């Protein structure tokens, strides 16, 4: 008789996964995703970054399950993997070169009104393609000149979310406008 997965302990599920059980890791994921999400969110202070880090962490755990030595609880092992994924994501986000929006919107010759109008039209068209959160963050911070904290209060999100949305939006705009 096959024992139901929901009754297995975490170590048993991890061992079953390593032995080839196609459903064992899914049960581990279901049990621990909310706790891993909570720790990722507290670590990154950014829901998008946290979501990416949790995905990276569980994928890494899935692939490297046989490296679990059993010296700690499976949850401790998962926490460490997810926190490391958070730190990696945060390092990558901080290391990315950010193109300030001002450098994207300035035409080569500030006295050329035609080029300035053309650049403004191109920027507006590119801005319209961004996800709403990124577009609003860029408008408030870069175009309206609001501090990040005020933009965060207006949009009802964390300051880190505004920063990441601006960074992602700037990078996308730079690519769309052929500057990045």
Image (cartoon, helix red, strand yellow):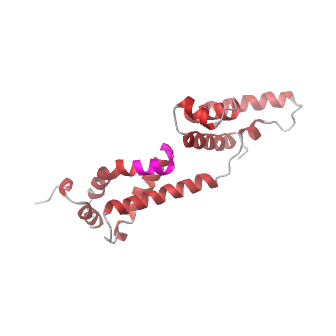
Residue occupying the far left of the picture? 1
Residue 18 is situated, as x and y percent measured from the top left of the image, at 30, 66
Magenta stretch contains residue 118: no
* Along the viewing direction, whichever of 9 and 19 lies nearer the viewer: 9
Residue at the location (28% across, 63% down)? 14
Residue 143 in the figure: left or right of residue 91: right
Query: 102 left or right of 80?
Result: right
Residue at coordinates 65% horizontally, 44% vertically from top-left?
171
Q: Which residues are magenta?
A: 38-48
Q: Decide if residue 107 is in sight here.
A: yes
Residue 105 figure quarter? top right
Count of numbered tags: 0
Residue 169's place in the image compared with 92, above or below, is: above
Q: Residue at x 45, y 55 (%)?
A: 56
Q: Position of residue 66 (x, y in %)?
A: 34, 69
Dominant SS of magenta comes to helix
Residue 65 occupies which quadrant of the picture?
bottom left
Instruction: Report x, y in % for residue 30.
Output: 30, 50
Give the residue displayed 58% in from the left and 55% down from the top.
Answer: 92
Check residue 46 for magenta coloring: yes
């Amino acid at each position: 008789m096959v024992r139901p997965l929901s009754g297995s302990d975490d170590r048993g599920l991890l061992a079953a996964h390593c032995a080839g059980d196609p459903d064992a890791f899914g049960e581990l994921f279901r049990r621990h995703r909310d706790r891993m999400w909570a720790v990722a969110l507290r670590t990154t202070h950014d829901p998008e970054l946290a979501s990416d880090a949790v995905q990276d962490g569980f994928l890494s755990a899935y692939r490297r399950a046989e490296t679990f030595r059993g010296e700690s609880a499976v949850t401790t092992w998962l926490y460490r993997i997810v926190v490391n994924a958070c730190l990696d994501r945060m390092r990558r986000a901080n290391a990315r070169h950010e193109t300030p929006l001002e450098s994207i919107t300035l035409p080569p010759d500030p006295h050329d009104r035609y080029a300035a109008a053309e650049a403004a039209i191109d920027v507006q068209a590119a801005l319209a393609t961004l996800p709403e959160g990124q577009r609003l963050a860029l408008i408030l911070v870069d175009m309206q000149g609001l501090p990040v904290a005020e933009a965060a209060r207006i949009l009802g999100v964390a300051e880190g979310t505004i920063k990441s949305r601006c960074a992602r939006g700037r990078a996308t705009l730079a690519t769309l406008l052929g500057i990045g």
